[in-house]
Amino acid sequence: MSQDKTILIAGMAPGLGTALQARFEQGGYCVVGVSRQAPSPWAVDLTDALATHALFQQLDERCPPLAGVIHNAMQFHRQAMLDTTPQTLQSVWQSMVLTAFNTAQAAIPRLQRAGGGSLIFSGASGSLRAGPRFAAFSSAKFALRGLAQALAREHNPDGIHVAHVVIDGLIRSKKTEQRFAPGRSEPLIEPDALAEQYFQLFHQAPSVWSDEVNFRPVLTSH
């Protein structure tokens, strides 16, 4: 299948990231996964605005035209508020909000020139409700949701579909199962199934664009 458009996955990681890559490649896209630990030349610190813009210049030179960005970058942090340092709060905020801002600022002019595209931002249950020990994490996720709403209202008229995805549950991966799953009875979100929903969201017709969707696993009875 010809890959004539590029999707950038910001915050590439096993689990959802690899599932998204597989689904969009199956759909005919060239997929570029970016993270601090990604293989060269896609190891980029997206909190650095200059490095982020340099990344998009590389995409212009080496890849098909940009069709959109999926922003998954995050830093999970759970700690009592009184034990959280200002430096930690700043780091958590930068990992989710500043990376999204820098990525969007580089992507939007390219999508405008292309006549449209999609920006999808991955949120969490902490985007809507904050629990104890999540002051840093949820305040950043709340801010990411606000950024997505602002971008949607500003750039929908440019043909750019901006959507915020509330992932209200744990996504299955080796890391998730090691960190959270032992002893839990709640179901996990299957990454391939979630990737399919991102793909469909990416291709919604403009007359039915969703600005926000909420995905959560349901425990089925047998």
Image: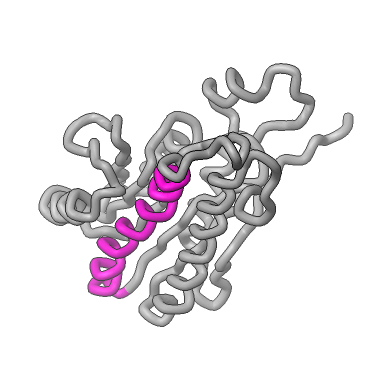
Toward the bottom, the furthest residue is: 157
Residue plotted at (25% across, 70% down):
109
Total marks placed: 0
Q: Is residue 109 magenta?
A: yes
Q: In the image, is residue 126 part of the stretch drawn in magenta?
A: no
Asked if residue 86 lies left or right of residue 158, the reply is: right
**Is the residue 156 above or below the residue 204 in the image?**
below
Q: Which residues are magenta?
A: 89-115
At 62% from the left and 37% from the top, the residue drawn is 80
Quarter the C terminus occupies: top right
In the picture, measured across the screen, residue 88 lies left or right of residue 59, that is right
- Residue 201, compared with residue 8, is above or below; it is below
Q: Is residue 6 above or below residue 22?
A: below
Image position, residue 113 (x, y; %): 23, 73
Q: Residue at x 71, y 40 (%)?
A: 217
Q: Residue furthest left?
A: 61
In the image, 193 versus 158, the foreground residue is 158
Residue 128, placed above or below residue 117: above
> Which secondary structure type mostly characterizes the magenta part of the structure?
helix
Residue 62 appears in the picture as rendered = yes
Which residue is depicted at the point 51% across and 50% down? 122
Image coordinates of residue 176 in percent, x first then y, are 57, 26
